[in-house]
Image (cartoon, grey):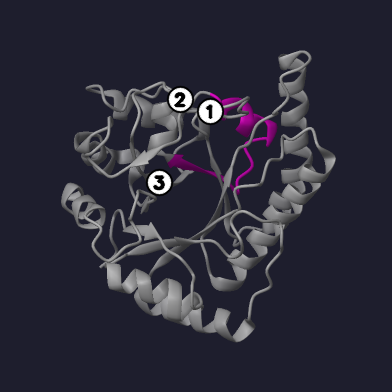
Amino acid sequence: MELRNPVGSHVPVGKGLVGGALATADALGCETLQIFVGNPRGWALSAGRPEQDREFRTEIEKRDMRVFVHAPYLVNLGSPTPATYERSAAVVAHNLRRAAEIGAEGVVVHTGSFVSTEGDPERQYAAALGQVREALLPILDALGEDGPWLLLEPTAGQGRSLCAGVEDLAAYLGALDLHPRAGICLDTCHVFAAGAPLDEPGGVAATLERIVEIGGPDRLRLIHANDSMDVRGAFKDRHQRIGQGYIGETAFAELFAHPATTGVPFILETPGSGAPDTPDLPLLKRLRG
């Protein structure tokens, strides 16, 4: 039976796609999973192994399991440093190729920042969005209708973020001409840190409805389910276990129930969420009801 909202976790690859990532996901009871396809803190473009890729695709098809790739943390297409910008574009394109090879549904990319604290911030912001457009539109056009999604993940608002929280999605997606392969990954900790009122009555609904208003009804493709160690609007990206932070369990139950999340997987990135004794996965399944 197809689940309305499959629930899973980011898992380490370790011994390989099947012997490591998929074995861990199975042991945890994941219905969906997210992985890195290389060093999350490096620029190296790690080549895959065709036989392992084929075996992984076969196994996830048997399980009807939806898989996502997270791009390395270093990616910043808004960087004023040419080498960082060029490497970021290459890494995004490479991760999308690897996602297609292993049968993943999408690649999550942080939306980046324009870094510099000198000069006119409005001009720097505009220039950085121009870089995003220049890098991503050719990559998105090359994906085709059956390629993986590029999933844009707004940040928590730290530094000079290009897209912190929900409202900034309008300009970011606009820079990409609302490309049909550009989706949204909603990280609950990030948007809460950037000011989304997930802890207030009606706040979850208002946040989701604004996302739909900005991007359209089918652009929300993934939710990173993370509570927050810090209060709303703190601009701090510190994930907490579900129900043990300032967002609270009620918000996650409301996320599951809202029409805008129909068919959207939930991936945990909470402390210990990839460990055998994590309480977060069974808790999310209970909240899903």
First in sequence: mark 3 or mark 2? 2
- Numbered mark located on residue 241 in the image: none
Callout 2 crowding tier (Cα within 10 Å): few <14, some 14–19, many ≥20: many
Q: Quadrant of the N terminus?
A: bottom left
Left or right side of 73 for 277 = left
Is 240 or 256 nearer to us in this picture? 240
Would you name the residue on which mark 2 appears? Answer: 194
Using a 10 Å C-alpha cutoff, classify the residue at mark 3 as few (fewer than 14 neighbours), some (14 to 19) or many (20 or more): many
Q: Is residue 77 above or below residue 199?
A: below
Left-right relation of 147 to 221: right
Q: Secondary structure at mark 1?
A: loop
Specify the amino acid type for callout 3. His
Q: Are marks 3 and 2 in contact (CB under 8 Å)?
A: no
- Name the kind of residue labelled 1 in the image: Ala
Q: Residues within 10 Å of mark 1 (few under 14, many from 20)?
A: many
For the residues marked 3 and 2, what is the alpha-carbon distance in whole angstroms? Answer: 15 Å
User: Is 28 above or below relative to 247?
Assistant: below
Image side of residue 9 versus residue 120, left or right: left
> In the figure, residue 233 lies in which quadrant?
top left
Q: Residue at x 71, y 62 (%)?
A: 44
Indicate which disc, 2 or 1, sits on the residue closer to the N terminus: 1
For label 1, the residue is 164
Residue at 63% from the left image edge and 24% from the top image edge: 160
User: Mark 3 = which residue?
Assistant: 224
Q: Position of residue 141 (x, y in %)?
A: 72, 51
Q: Which residues are magenta?
A: 168-186
- The part of the image, by quadrant, that contains residue 134 is top right
Residue 175, given in percent of the width and then of the height, sits at 69, 31
Who is closer to the viewer here, 178 or 268?
A: 268
Tell me where residue 68 appears, x and y as whole percent. 49, 59
